[in-house]
Image (cartoon, rainbow, N blue to C red):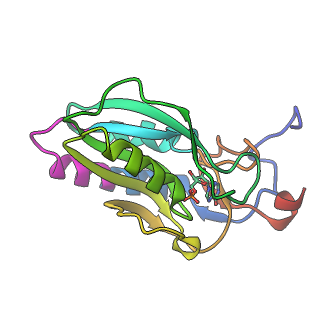
Amino acid sequence: MKADWSRRADENIGALLLDAPAIRKRVHELGDQITGDYRGRNPHLIAILKGACIFHADLVRAIDLSLSMDFIAVGSYGNAARTSGEVRLLKDLDESVEGRDVLLVEDILDTGLTVHYILQNLGSRGPRSLKVVTLLNKPSHRQVDVPVDYVGFEIPDHFVVGYGLDFKQRYRNLPEIRILSREALGG
Ligand code: IMP
């Protein structure tokens, strides 16, 4: 990684897909919807690391309820732009989900393998309810059907970065979401 990299100056990242105000607006709409749907309950929002951490951080602050949080990490992509099709647990939850209203928070649904694996895993631990919120849905490469309860944006088949999403661990700190250029993907 170049030491002098500036997210604002690097024009090779790629075209803008969703700017920060559009993301903020949609995250607040999702927060309002979740607040209404879970009224009278205390949802337990589980972020899938690392990609969902920024979305999760903004979403929990847009929900006007007493809630709790946890984090889970799975491996699927490694450092490449393509999935290996294999999912493995890298970091388990800190707390039990038994009897809780779990809302799984994902950054992007691509093949669906990651969320499918986690839903099966968490489903066997006795949560009271188990739902999924994803900021982005990229349905073109779906390999398994996954039930998604809340979607921020449907996006076309592009590799995107920013707002938590990375390419080779870079670009997560972009405040907007960009389509990674062919030059950046190849370089
Ligand atoms: P899935 O298992 O194929 O649904 O992939 C989900 C994971 O792949 C996400 O949590 C992301 O980490 C990663 N991923 C899928 N598409 C993209 C993308 O366009 N940009 C960055 N990461 C992606």
Residue 40 shown in magenta: yes
Position of the N terminus, as image quadrant, is top right
Image position, residue 180 (x, y; %) = 74, 61
Q: Is residue 96 left or right of residue 111?
A: left
Image position, residue 63 (x, y; %) = 27, 41
Q: Which residue shows up at 51% across the image and 44% down it?
A: 52
Q: Is residue 63 visible?
A: no
Image position, residue 98 (x, y; %) = 24, 33
Q: Is residue 139 visible?
A: yes
**Among the 4 quarters of the image, the one containing residue 43:** top left
Q: Is residue 134 left or right of residue 167?
A: left
Q: Is residue 1 left or right of residue 171?
A: right
Q: 166 or 123, which lies in front?
A: 123
Q: Which residue shows up at 53% across the image and 52% down it?
A: 20
Q: Residue furthest left?
A: 40
Q: Is residue 24 left or right of residue 80?
A: left
Q: Which residue shows up at 34% across the image and 38% down it?
A: 45
Q: Quadrant of ligand 1?
A: bottom right
Q: Which residues are magenta?
A: 30-43
